[in-house]
Amino acid sequence: MRLLLTNDDGYDQPGLLEVERTLSADHEVWVVAPLHHCSGSSHALGIYSSMELRREGERKWSLEGTPTDCVKIALQVVMKDRPPDMVISGVNPGANLAHNILYSGTVAAATEAALWGIPAIAVSVHVGGPEIVPRFGTAVSVLSRLMDADVRRHILPGEVLNVNVPDVDASALGPWSWTRMGRFAEDMPFTHLEPGRVFAYGRYRALPVRDPAGTDVEAISRGFVSLTLLQSDRTSRRRPPDLELTDGSL
């Protein structure tokens, strides 16, 4: 299979490198990933600056842009003549769960591929604390099993499979669970560097979830592999309400 790999941490980061090494044994792997760290960039574009594309090896490029820019450049320039069969984003060091799905550059890169009808997977591994080394090997073993099961056939056009892997050895993985996106009950806290004037986000910590049953957050807390199908089409599925407005436009 012809694969495009990307991430939001940088082309030379260990999560992506492990995916590249593993999947290159059985697939034609291409890499277009950010030159610099882009965590939390969501679906941002580098509209107001030029972006240098640098060749880093055979079928491997870095781009001075966002994860979304990387996928766009890959599809329009690097792989223009033969698009990838699938796009894989990650492995991200840190789970992308609940609201963080919307902030994630990892998920955004996969979503960009989905917008153009290419099956896409975002892969992240939970990290239990600031001093803990991410278990990229566990995440890649999960990804390899999904590839062996030909998961691409089960990802419909416009969908992204968001995969989150718990912080355990591969031998200790719990069940695999289809989940829904959770909803945090609290927001991320700020650190007040200068009260009332200078702020920074504090270290990430686990946040409580509203109605946790069946969510991605619950699955990871129980040591399960969380599989969540996301839609790139954000149109609400409910019937629009009947509105009576004075100008009659609705």
Image (cartoon, grey):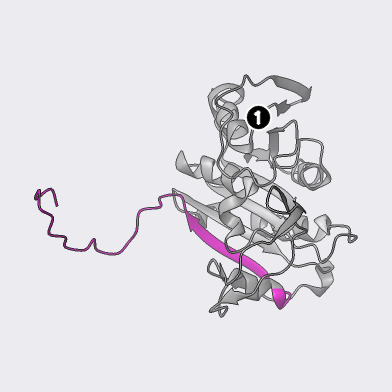
SS for tag 1?
loop
Identify the residue under disc 1.
65
Residue 247 lies in the magenta stretch: yes
Please name the residue shown 68% across and 39% down the image.
6
Q: Position of residue 239 (x, y in %)?
A: 24, 63
- Residue 151 lies in what quarter of the image? bottom right
Foreground residue, 230 or 50? 50
Which residue is more in the foreground, 16 or 148? 16
x and y, in percent, of residue 107 in the image: 60, 49
**Residue at the image position 56 percent from the left and 38 percent from the top:** 44
Relative horizontal placement of residue 234, taking residue 165 as reference (left or right):
left
Q: Quadrant of residue 149?
A: bottom right
72 falls in the magenta region: no
Disc 1 marks a residue whose amino acid type is Gly
Residue 209 left/right relative to 56: left
Q: Residue 124's image quarter?
A: bottom right
Q: Can residue 129 be seen?
A: yes
Q: Which residues are magenta?
A: 221-250
